[in-house]
Amino acid sequence: MRMNRGRLIVFSAPSGCGKGTMLAEILKDERFYCSISATTRKPREGEADGVNYYFLEKEDFVQRIDRNEFLEHACYCGNYYGTLVSEVESKLDAGVNVILEIEVQGAMKIKELRPDALFVFIAPPSVGELRRRLNKRGTETQEVIDKRVAQAAEELKYMEKYDYIIVNDALEDAVNDFFTVIRAESLKTSAQAEFIEEVIKNA
Ligand code: 5GP
């Protein structure tokens, strides 16, 4: 039997929405792979090259843009971020669902390039809660936190362009909601062309 191609899943959330913890849970399921992006941002404490990101110098990043190595790239809070083509296609061919954990500008580019992708937005219960979470994290300066809160307010405006919105209030519920979305997508008529053909052929 021919192997089904994996699904490309765009997963966006303003920082402070608990996207990282949600992803860690989702990735325990081996049907999913999270593409490792390239960035010009400096590593945070505990982050490793080739694990969290490929950390690149700006010059290297720009050269890779010129060589068309990125499916999409964007500038976010003064740094470049990009999805490497090499991280995506071979996994999809192998039947693995590839998650792109990217911000909204990149997501909108993917929407043009790959309208068949699944677009999931992770939202905070409220902007007040988002601010509280960002302040609590304590890994960034107040200036960076303020910049990220302002950025988050901008990103929330794109929410309606996504296929699904999951509010991350309680982690377990949010992760369950994600798997419910995946299940529902797999039951769509459009996802069952082979099954339909088979049943009709044998009817
Ligand atoms: P952080 O610096 O907190 O790791 O990431 C900042 C933002 O960049 C997050 O919203 C994250 O989703 C986004 N991001 C990470 N990788 C990529 C990428 O490859 N492309 C785009 N467009 N955004 C990315």
Image (tube, grey):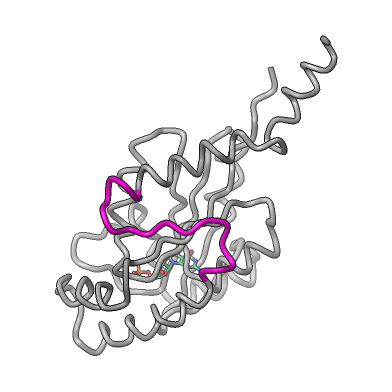
Q: Residue at x 41, y 65 (%)?
A: 13
Asked if the magenta segment contains residue 168, the reply would be yes
The residue lying toward the viewer, choosing from 203 and 182, is 203
Identify which residue is drawn at 33% across, 58% down: 168
The N terminus: image quadrant: top right
Q: Position of residue 40 (x, y in %)?
A: 40, 74
- Residue at image x 61%, y 33%? 187
Q: Is residue 119 above or below residue 130?
A: above
Q: Quadrant of the C terminus?
A: top right
State which quadrant residue 3 falls in.
top right
Horizontal side of residue 126 vs 92, given as left or right: left
Q: Would you say 13 lies left or right of 196 here?
A: left
The part of the chain drawn in magenta is 159-174
Q: Residue furthest bottom?
A: 143
Residue 163, position as x, y percentages in the image: 58, 57
Q: Choose between 32 and 72: the one closer to the eye.
A: 32
Residue 66's x, y, as percent? 64, 72
Expressed as whole percent of the image width and height from the top left, the position of residue 9 reads 54, 50
